Image (cartoon, rainbow, N blue to C red):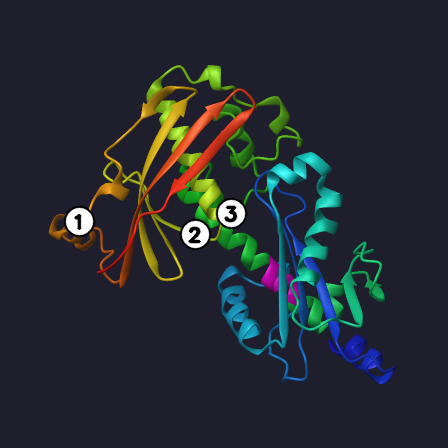
C-alpha cells in the first residue's frame, strides 16, 4: 500500500499545501482533546509512520521527535476538560481542529481529515475513513496528537498520583473507574461524562484543612500544566517546583476559602536566592538549570469556583 497515495493524487490536481488532521482524546474520562494539523512538505518520509494506535509508546516518542524535526508546518490545538463539559466532546474536537489549523504558519489549500469532517468551512477538505492508516500526513498528525496528549497526562499524574494517569492516560480502565468510585473525581475529570457525573466531590466534603490545602495545590498544578509548565516536584518545603523554557520555578502556594487562609507559608517571592536554597536544589538534583524564579501563588475557593493569582518573583542566575 502506498501511504502517500492521497497526497500524490491531490498534488497532481494542483494542491500545494496539503495538511493532514487528526485528534487524540475523544474517549477518555479525564484531560483534554488534542488535534494536530500537519503539512509534511516535500521531505523524505520517515519509515515506521502509521496509525499512532498501532505503534508502541516508546516508538511513538522516537517518531514524534523525527516528525517535528522534518515537517514543514505543525499546528496543535488543545481543548481542556472544562470546555469539553461546556460544549460537549464533539464540538470540542471540532474546536481543537480549528485551533490547530489556525496555528499553522502556512495557509493550507486542502485538508485531509481522519474520519468524517473537521467543521472547517473556509478550506477545501477531503474526509478519509481510517485516514491515519491510509495517509502519511494524517498518520504523522495522529502521532503528534497522541504523544502531545500523553505527555500532558504524565504531567497530571505527578499532581494526582492516586489515579495513575501515566498508565491509562485518562481512559476508562477498570483501575481508573474503581479509583474514581473510591476517591471521587479530581479537577481534570470530565464532569459531564459517566460515571464521573456520579462521583463529583463537593468542597464541603473536604472536612480537614489539610485536604483542602492539597486540593488547592493540585488545582494550581493543573493550571500550570495547561500553561505548558513541567511539574518537577511537589514537596513540603516549596509546595511545588516546576520549569518552563529552561527556567526553574520554586512556588509557595497559599490556599484560602473566602477570607480564611488554609495553607500559608513565607512568600517565596520575598526571599532572595541564597546558599541555603542553592544547597536545597543540589539535594533535589535540580541544580542543572541556569536560571531560577521564586514565586508565590494564591488560590481562593469561591462560591462558584476558584481564583488563581500568580505573583512572579525576579529571575536569578544559578
| Residue sitting at x 80%, y 72% | 109
Q: Is residue 234 above or below residue 275?
A: above
Q: Are marks 2 and 1 in contact (CB under 8 Å)?
A: no
The percent coordinates of residue 290 (x first, y second) are 27, 64
Task: Find residue 277 and name its label.
Answer: 1
The percent coordinates of residue 14 (x first, y second) are 85, 82
Foreground pick, 193 / 286: 286
In the rendered view of the protein, which quadrant contains the N terminus? bottom right
Q: Main secondary structure of the magenta part?
A: helix
Query: In what element is the residue under mark 1?
Result: helix
| Residue sitting at x 47%, y 41% | 222
Specify whether residue 167 is in view. yes
How many numbered marks does the figure carry? Answer: 3
From this viewpoint, which residue is outermost toward the left?
A: 275
Query: In what element is the residue under mark 2?
Result: loop
The residues bearing labels 2 and 1 have C-alpha atoms spaced at a distance of 21 Å
Within 10 Å of disc 3 (Cα), the crowding (few <14, some 14-19, many 20+) is: some
Task: Find residue 209 and name its label.
Answer: none
Foreground pick, 102 / 211: 102
Q: Which range of residues does the magenta coloring cover?
A: 141-145
The residue singled out by tag 3 in the image is 226
Foreground pick, 267 / 181: 267
Amino acid at each position: 500500500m502506498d501511504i502517500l497515495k492521497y497526497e500524490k493524487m491531490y498534488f497532481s490536481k494542483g494542491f500545494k499545501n496539503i495538511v493532514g488532521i487528526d485528534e487524540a482524546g475523544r474517549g477518555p474520562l479525564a484531560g483534554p482533546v488534542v488535534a494536530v494539523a500537519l503539512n509534511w512538505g516535500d521531505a523524505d518520509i520517515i519509515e515506521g509512520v502509521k496509525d499512532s494506535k498501532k505503534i508502541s509508546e516508546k516508538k511513538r516518542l522516537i517518531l514524534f521527535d523525527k516528525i517535528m524535526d522534518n515537517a514543514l508546518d505543525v499546528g496543535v490545538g488543545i481543548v481542556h476538560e472544562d470546555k469539553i463539559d461546556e460544549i460537549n466532546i464533539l464540538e470540542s474536537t471540532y474546536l481543537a481542529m480549528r485551533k490547530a489549523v489556525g496555528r499553522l504558519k502556512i495557509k493550507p489549500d486542502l485538508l485531509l481529515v481522519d474520519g468524517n469532517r473537521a467543521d472547517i468551512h473556509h478550506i477545501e477538505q477531503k474526509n478519509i475513513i481510517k485516514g491515519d492508516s491510509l495517509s502519511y500526513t494524517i498518520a504523522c498528525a495522529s502521532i503528534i496528537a497522541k504523544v502531545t496528549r500523553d505527555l500532558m497526562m504524565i504531567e497530571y499524574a505527578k499532581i494526582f498520583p492516586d489515579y495513575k494517569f501515566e498508565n491509562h492516560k485518562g481512559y476508562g480502565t477498570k483501575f481508573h473507574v474503581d479509583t474514581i468510585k473510591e476517591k471521587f473525581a479530581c479537577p481534570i475529570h470530565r464532569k459531564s461524562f459517566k460515571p464521573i457525573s456520579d462521583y463529583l466531590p463537593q468542597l464541603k466534603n473536604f472536612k480537614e484543612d489539610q485536604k483542602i490545602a492539597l486540593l488547592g495545590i493540585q488545582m494550581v498544578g493543573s493550571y500550570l500544566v495547561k500553561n505548558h509548565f513541567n511539574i518537577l516536584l511537589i514537596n513540603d518545603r516549596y509546595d511545588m517546583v516546576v520549569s518552563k523554557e529552561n527556567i526553574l520555578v520554586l512556588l509557595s502556594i497559599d490556599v484560602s476559602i473566602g477570607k480564611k487562609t488554609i495553607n500559608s507559608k513565607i512568600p517565596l517571592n520575598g526571599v532572595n536566592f541564597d546558599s541555603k536554597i542553592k544547597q536545597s536544589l543540589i539535594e533535589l538534583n535540580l541544580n542543572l538549570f541556569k536560571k531560577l524564579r521564586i514565586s508565590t501563588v494564591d488560590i481562593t475557593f469561591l462560591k462558584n469556583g476558584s481564583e488563581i493569582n500568580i505573583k512572579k518573583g525576579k529571575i536569578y542566575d544559578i
